[in-house]
Image (tube, rainbow, N blue to C red):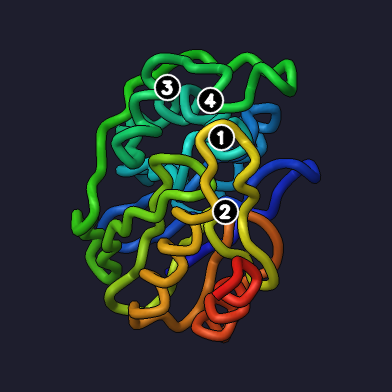
């Protein structure tokens, strides 16, 4: 099942808890509301439940900020695309943009993911898709069972991610959205804004916005 944890403050990312035989959290917000995030997870999985995976779509501070707190609380492992995982491990505040917003995010262990990797939760099988453009190491997660696409800031229900930040590239974003066009997507679960039931339509609109 997919549970939406609504942002507690306006600039937190969307957070999704995907539950099955194992449980995965996709993105974690800024870290300014870590207790709220932990409480929301506990209310879904119960006091004895486990959080097995912490999956990041990319390394920007508004998506990774609660990472260290969640690892302490649940003992889970964190994962991100290769380039962005390195930035999280290194505490690269320029690349994560935390420095620009005066938010301190301590470095924490984050393992690399590559295109084609699968996180099997039992009931959900999340396929890792490398989608650079918003950042150099951005990824999306496609549930091969339900067709849900967790798109981070690559594409939104009615828009696309910015490419004017450190590590952004419009041409890479365009290619990434083209890549998503070929995937068997149903619903779109973006990093900000509303969920789109018509995932393919949202991806098509995104491609039109980047000039194809």
> Where residue 24 appears, x then y in whole percent?
37, 50
Asked if disc 2 and disc 1 are in contact, CB closer than 8 Å, the reply is yes
Would you say 22 lies left or right of 178 here?
left
Circle 1 sits in a helix, a strand or a loop, which is it? Answer: loop
Lower sequence index among marks 2 and 4: 4
| Nearest to the observer: residue 36 or residue 45 | 36
Task: Report x, y in % for residue 41.
Answer: 52, 46
Q: Is residue 109 above or below residue 4?
A: above
For the residues marked 2 and 1, what is the alpha-carbon distance in whole angstroms? 10 Å
4 vs 9, left or right, is left
- Residue linked to disc 4: 95
First of labels 2, 1 by sequence position: 1
**Is 159 on the left-hand or right-hand side of 23?**
right
Give percent across and percent down for residue 126.
29, 62
Q: Quadrant of the N terminus?
A: bottom left
CB atoms at circles 2 and 4 under 8 Å apart?
A: no
Looking at marks 3 and 4 on the same chain, the residue that comes earlier in the sequence is marked by: 3
In the displayed structure, 95 sits above or below 90; it is: below
In front of the other: 110 or 47 = 110
Residue drawn at 62 percent across, 26 percent down: 97
In the rendered structure, which disc, 3 or 2, sits on the residue that comes first in sequence? Answer: 3
Secondary structure category for the residue under label 2 = loop
Give the secondary structure at mark 4: loop
Residue matched to label 2: 153
């Amino acid at each position: 099942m997919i549970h939406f944890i609504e942002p507690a403050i306006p600039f937190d990312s969307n957070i999704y808890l995907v539950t099955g035989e194992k449980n995965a959290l996709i993105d974690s917000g800024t870290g300014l509301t870590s207790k709220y995030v932990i409480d929301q997870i506990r209310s879904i999985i119960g006091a004895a439940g486990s959080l097995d995976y912490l999956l990041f779509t990319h390394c920007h501070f508004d998506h990774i900020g609660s990472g260290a707190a969640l690892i302490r609380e649940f003992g889970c492992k964190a994962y991100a695309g290769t380039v962005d995982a390195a930035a999280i491990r290194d505490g690269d505040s320029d690349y994560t943009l935390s420095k620009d917003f005066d938010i301190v995010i301590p470095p924490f262990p984050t393992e690399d993911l590559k295109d084609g990797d699968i996180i099997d939760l039992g009931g959900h099988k999340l396929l890792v898709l490398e989608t650079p453009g918003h950042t150099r190491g951005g990824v999306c997660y496609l549930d091969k069972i339900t067709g849900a696409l967790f798109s981070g800031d690559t594409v939104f229900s009615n828009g696309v991610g910015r490419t004017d930040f450190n590590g952004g590239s419009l041409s890479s974003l365009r290619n990434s959205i083209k890549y998503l066009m070929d995937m068997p997507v149903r619903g779109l679960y973006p990093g900000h804004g509303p969920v789109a039931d018509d995932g393919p339509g949202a991806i098509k609109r995104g491609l039109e916005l980047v000039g194809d």
